[in-house]
Image: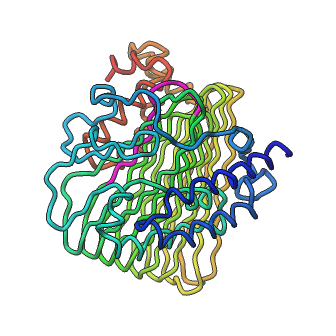
């Protein structure tokens, strides 16, 4: 406990050096928010397993590590180093961030419609102050979450995407966060702001990768604002070093009759916490939260979903599948909150898990919190193993045992992947799944 307290104090001391550096003209209006967020972090401290929302996950490995702030250093990657992280056959603009900082030489922006702004957040502050000041740090609640408070205090760069009214963005935007070795554990605080005005459409991919197997900590926050009749798809792909830590928070504010989909594929890191929190604030909104997490070794993956129905006639669906091998541990904590005025809510939550070894664990906690009386809400969870009868059937058709097992696991993962509508992204993620699965090569042969 003393070590954890000392490290918390270390963040306070680092802020005293960090604040003067970013307190210039562009960030000046956010300095009060920074200070309030840091003060709240000082009050909260890092969460412990005594906190209900963290009861299955210890963040002691994060709290006890003396992470260095992101700084220039290390060997910056070249474009060829990033080729494994591109989507074959997909034309899209790509913003690359190296250790949390925008790398224009590695980024590529394709021609965009006149109603679209795609920029690093730090650069956009001077050019587009009005939409940024109207939305940044307005939705992700640093008063309740220590990691969001830490991100808000130390936010320095990330992506700013603004799709103006009536604009349809045909090509996805790919945000690639690359961690590179610097000789010391590095912490980054990516902060993304995505604003889709009314009657607009867009697809965003938020992707975390590592070059090298060192210890990193990515503490990202993404705020998404979707206006009336807006349509937005967000993909989170997490495939960092097996020694890394990743805490990501996706906070979505939905307007009337908007439609949002959130897809997550988690395969990397030693410890992952994936927070998804949509608020259906306008009548007639729809939301799909879809995810796949796969862990092995001693990986720990915690998925915390909070779906708030704040207006009537809104629909939400949650589908999360987990595959756990080795001595890994998974967590699914899903909560549907239906507020008093959210009559005619239709909400469904499903969590399905496969355990591939005797030492793998899953803690699943679906919850309904309903304050309205005219709603339709369901939730459920399953935990099981690979069906041996199905394996026997495939073997009787001439498929080797390990290939049959891989094929069944891929089919289980495919339930999540098939909901991803952008074909090149889906195909790329199918490849990630095939690489992860035991005996993936026989799976490729069967396919």
Q: Residue at x 69, y 52 (%)?
A: 13
Task: Identify the residue at horizontal 28%, vertical 26% (top origin).
Answer: 80
Give the residues drawn in magenta, as a range: 204-215
Q: Nearer the viewer, residue 330 or 120?
A: 120
Instruction: Check the image and name the residue furthest to the bottom.
Output: 341
* 62 is higher (above) or lower (below) than 394: below
Query: Which quadrant, please, contains the C terminus?
Result: top left
- 53 up-or-down from 66: above or below: below
Where in the figure is residue 238, as x and y percent of width and height?
A: 47, 40
Name the image quarter holding residue 365: bottom right
Whether residue 281 is visible to the viewer of this picture, yes or no, is: yes
**406 to 251, vertically: above or below:** above
Say whether residue 331 is left or right of residue 284.
right
Number of numbered discs = 0
> Quadrant location of residue 126?
bottom left
- In the figure, 194 relative to 135: above or below? above
Left or right, 15 with reference to 140: right
Residue 12 located left or right of residue 86: right
Residue 34 in the image: state x and y as whole percent.
57, 66
Q: From this viewpoint, is residue 412 visible? A: no
């Amino acid at each position: 406990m003393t070590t954890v307290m000392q490290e918390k104090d270390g963040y306070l001391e680092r802020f005293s050096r960090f604040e003067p550096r970013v307190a210039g003209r562009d960030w000046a209006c956010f300095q009060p928010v920074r200070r309030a967020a840091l003060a709240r972090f000082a009050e909260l401290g890092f969460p412990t397993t005594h906190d209900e929302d963290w009861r299955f996950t210890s963040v002691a490995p994060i709290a006890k590590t003396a992470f260095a702030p992101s700084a220039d250093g290390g060997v910056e990657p070249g474009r060829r180093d990033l080729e494994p992280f591109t989507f074959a056959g997909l034309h899209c603009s790509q913003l690359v961030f190296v250790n949390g900082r925008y790398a224009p030489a590695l980024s590529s922006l394709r021609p965009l419609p006149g109603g679209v702004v795609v920029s690093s957040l730090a650069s956009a502050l001077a050019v587009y102050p009005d939409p940024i000041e109207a939305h940044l740090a307005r939705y992700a609640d640093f008063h309740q979450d220590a990691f969001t408070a830490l991100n808000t205090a130390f936010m320095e760069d990330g992506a700013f995407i603004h799709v103006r009214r009536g604009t349809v963005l045909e090509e996805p935007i790919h945000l690639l966060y690359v961690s590179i070795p610097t000789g010391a554990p590095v912490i980054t605080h990516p902060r993304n702001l995505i604003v889709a005005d009314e009657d607009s459409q867009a697809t965003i991919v938020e992707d975390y990768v590592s070059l090298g197997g060192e210890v990193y900590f990515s503490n990202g926050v993404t705020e998404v604002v979707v206006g009336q009749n807006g349509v937005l798809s967000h993909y989170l792909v997490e495939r960092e070093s097996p020694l890394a830590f990743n805490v990501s928070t996706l906070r979505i504010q939905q307007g009337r009759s908007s439609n949002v989909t959130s897809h997550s594929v988690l395969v990397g890191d030693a410890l992952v916490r994936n927070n998804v929190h949509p608020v259906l604030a306008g009548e007639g909104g729809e939301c799909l939260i879809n995810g796949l997490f796969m862990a092995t070794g001693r990986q720990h993956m915690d998925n915390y979903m909070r779906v708030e129905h704040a207006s009537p006639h809104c629909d939400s669906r949650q589908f999360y599948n987990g595959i756990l091998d080795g001595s890994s541990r998974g967590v699914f904590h899903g909560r549907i909150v239906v507020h008093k005025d959210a009559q005619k809510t239709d909400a469904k939550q499903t969590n399905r898990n496969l355990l591939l070894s005797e030492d793998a664990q899953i803690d699943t906690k679906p919850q309904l919190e309903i304050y309205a009386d005219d709603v339709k809400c369901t939730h459920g969870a399953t935990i099981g193993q690979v069906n041996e009868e199905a394996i026997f059937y495939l073997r009787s058709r001439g498929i080797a045992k390990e290939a049959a097992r891989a094929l069944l696991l891929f089919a289980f993962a495919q339930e999540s992947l098939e909901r991803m509508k952008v074909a090149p992204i889906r195909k790329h993620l199918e490849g990630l799944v095939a690489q992860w699965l035991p005996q993936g090569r026989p799976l490729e042969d069967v396919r």
